[in-house]
């Protein structure tokens, strides 16, 4: 049965009553950290090892003074004895993608990610590796509403794909690179979230990424953001191009991704690159 719609003063009273709490709750003191991340990485497709540098500009929008930061080293989960390995072999309902596969990885198949030479605004910071987490004691406190710059080198090995990241997937993709670099952990009103990687890994800070990837020129790369040097890359990203190869037969891909939660990429020599133009919208790759 339909109820007659109220009219006149009753409607005005209902609107006023329902709107007042919304106006009150809209006045909040929430904040969110912000990052700018520059990554330069080289991947050896024969050994599946990569090296790189990271420059992280960290904006502290919180009301707190920070004396330490935490980074995720996700690839360290994919080696025998890791927390993910132990958990997958000891709980009653393990992730079927994992099971005992990590324990069976050979040294050449395992994942690895390490950092070295970290500087905060030019001064050495102290690093402590804790499995899939890197604790960094800052050289100087980071005060509220201030930013600081961290620079460091990293190196690692791409594991055989166990979950969503790695090499040689069941679908035949050579490299599926998610959670592949040292990624700063999230800091919110509850504090730091340096959660070890045992099954969930998606909470992080938003920011802008400037990424250069160098690898064998036979591989086509798909990645977050937009390709900045399409005219010198080829691979279907721009018409009438002559790829500018490095002396060692590799190409350097330059991507910029703004206001994203993470930077992911994938590469395979057998990719077919197709495009589709959204009417009045972006070009899809």
Image (cartoon, helix red, strand yellow):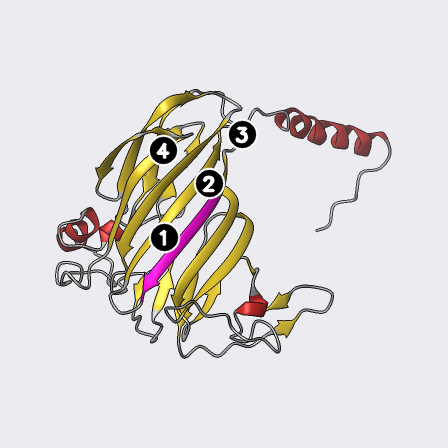
Q: Cα distance, mark 1 to mark 2?
A: 13 Å
Residue that badge 2 annotates: 205
Magenta stretch, main secondary structure class:
strand
SS type, badge 3: loop
**Horizontally, is 282 left or right of 209 in the view?**
right
Q: Residues within 10 Å of mark 4 (few under 14, many from 20)?
A: some
**Horizontally, is 176 left or right of 109 in the view?**
right
Query: Dots 1 and 3: beta carbons under 8 Å?
Result: no
Position of the C terminus by quadrant: bottom right
Picture layout, residue 81 above or below residue 18: below
**Horizontally, is 10 left or right of 242 in the view?**
right
Q: What residue is drawn where x is 53% and y is 24%? A: 145
**Magenta-tinted stretch:** 37-44
Among numbered discs 1 and 3, the one appearing first in the sequence: 3
Query: Dots 4 and 2: beta carbons under 8 Å?
Result: no
SS type, badge 2: loop
């Amino acid at each position: 049965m339909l109820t007659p719609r109220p009219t006149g003063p009753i409607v005005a009273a209902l609107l006023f009553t329902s709107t007042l709490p919304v106006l009150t709750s809209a006045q909040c003191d929430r904040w969110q950290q912000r990052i700018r991340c520059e990554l330069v990485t080289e991947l050896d497709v024969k050994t599946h090892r990569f090296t790189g540098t990271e420059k992280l500009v960290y904006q502290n929008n919180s009301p707190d003074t920070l004396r330490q930061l935490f980074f995720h080293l996700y690839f360290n989960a994919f080696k025998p004895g890791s927390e993910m390995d132990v958990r997958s072999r000891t709980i009653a309902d393990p992730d079927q993608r994992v099971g005992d596969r990590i324990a069976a990885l050979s040294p050449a198949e395992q994942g690895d990610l390490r950092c070295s030479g970290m500087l905060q605004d030019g001064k050495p910071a102290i690093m402590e590796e804790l499995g899939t987490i890197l604790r960094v004691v800052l050289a100087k406190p980071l005060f509220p509403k201030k930013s600081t710059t961290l620079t460091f080198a990293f190196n690692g090995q791409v594991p055989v794909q166990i979950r969503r990241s790695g090499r040689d997937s069941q679908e035949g993709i050579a490299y599926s690179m998610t959670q592949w670099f040292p990624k700063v952990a999230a800091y919110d009103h509850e504090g730091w979230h340096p959660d070890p990687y045992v099954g969930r890994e998606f909470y992080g800070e938003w920011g802008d990424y400037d990424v250069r990837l160098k690898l064998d020129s036979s591989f086509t790369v798909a990645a977050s953001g937009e390709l900045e040097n399409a005219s010198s890359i080829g691979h279907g990203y721009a018409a009438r191009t002559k790829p500018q190869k490095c002396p060692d037969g590799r190409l350097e891909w330059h991507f910029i991704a703004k206001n994203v939660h993470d930077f992911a990429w994938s590469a395979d020599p057998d990719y077919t690159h197709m495009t589709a133009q959204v009417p009045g919208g972006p070009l899809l790759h």
